[in-house]
Image (cartoon, grey):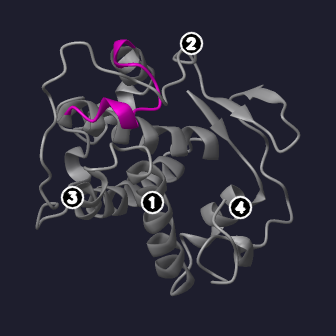
Amino acid sequence: MKLRQNVRHWAAKRALTLPVVGEKVNDRLVDLHTNVFAGKADADRADERRDHLDDFFDATMDTYVAALEDDFPEAEAREITHIQANFDFYNHGWTEMMEFPADELQAHYDRYEDFFGKYGITISDPLGEFRPAGGIAEALDAREAEDPEHPHAVGGFADDAYVETEDGELVVGGQDEPADVDPSKAPGVDEEQSAD
């Protein structure tokens, strides 16, 4: 799929594994993702999905760290979590929130099949072993559409992780991590930072 990658992504990667700071960054990233995807939801449905999205994205932070520990590059570790989210959106019929078309679900799964299999993640169970013991907040399904709409989906990027750099260049697989990453640039470390 197509992602962006900038200094804040690298800072978040570093910060998520630090004590205290990691919790603040985790919480800010959850808020950021919930706000972005709730903003893509049908306006009359966004608020009723927020608790579910908060819990879901909090669980995917653990997936992200596990993927990094399994030696995936930052872009692929992040892509894995976005794929999980798209599985969840599809399962709930929230196709207006999807980042890629539903007909690419299997292709995205297949690319990370070994990782997903290791942790029990499937299209129908997007969190697998990362599902919290207490579960996650329920949310209403919206599966009535026979021909789902994907207004925010970008197709044609199912064969690899495609990263758009700050300069607008499209790089397959992502960029190399800079040597001088400052974890304090991660979302949530300095609450004055804007969400990007």
**Tag nearer the camera, 3 or 2:** 3
Is residue 79 toward the left or the right of residue 189 in the image?
left
State the mark number for residue 8. Answer: 4
Vertical order, 141 against 160 (above or below): below
Task: Give percent across and percent down for residue 187.
Answer: 62, 71
Residue position marked by numbered label 2 in the rendering:
156
Callout 4 amino acid: Arg
Q: Neighbour class for label 2 at 10 Å: few (<14), some, many (≥20)?
A: few
Q: Neighbour class for label 1 at 10 Å: few (<14), some, many (≥20)?
A: some
Vertical order, 46 against 78 (above or below): below
Disc 3 on helix, strand or loop?
A: helix
Q: CA distance from mark 2 to mark 1?
A: 26 Å
Q: CA distance from mark 3 to mark 2?
A: 31 Å
State the mark number for residue 35. Answer: 1
Question: Which callout, 2 or 1, points at the residue further toward the start of the chain?
Answer: 1
Task: Give percent across and percent down for residue 71.
Answer: 56, 44
Callout 3 amino acid: Glu
Q: CA distance from mark 2 to mark 4?
A: 26 Å
Question: Which callout, 1 or 4, points at the residue further toward the start of the chain?
Answer: 4
Disc 1 on helix, strand or loop?
A: helix
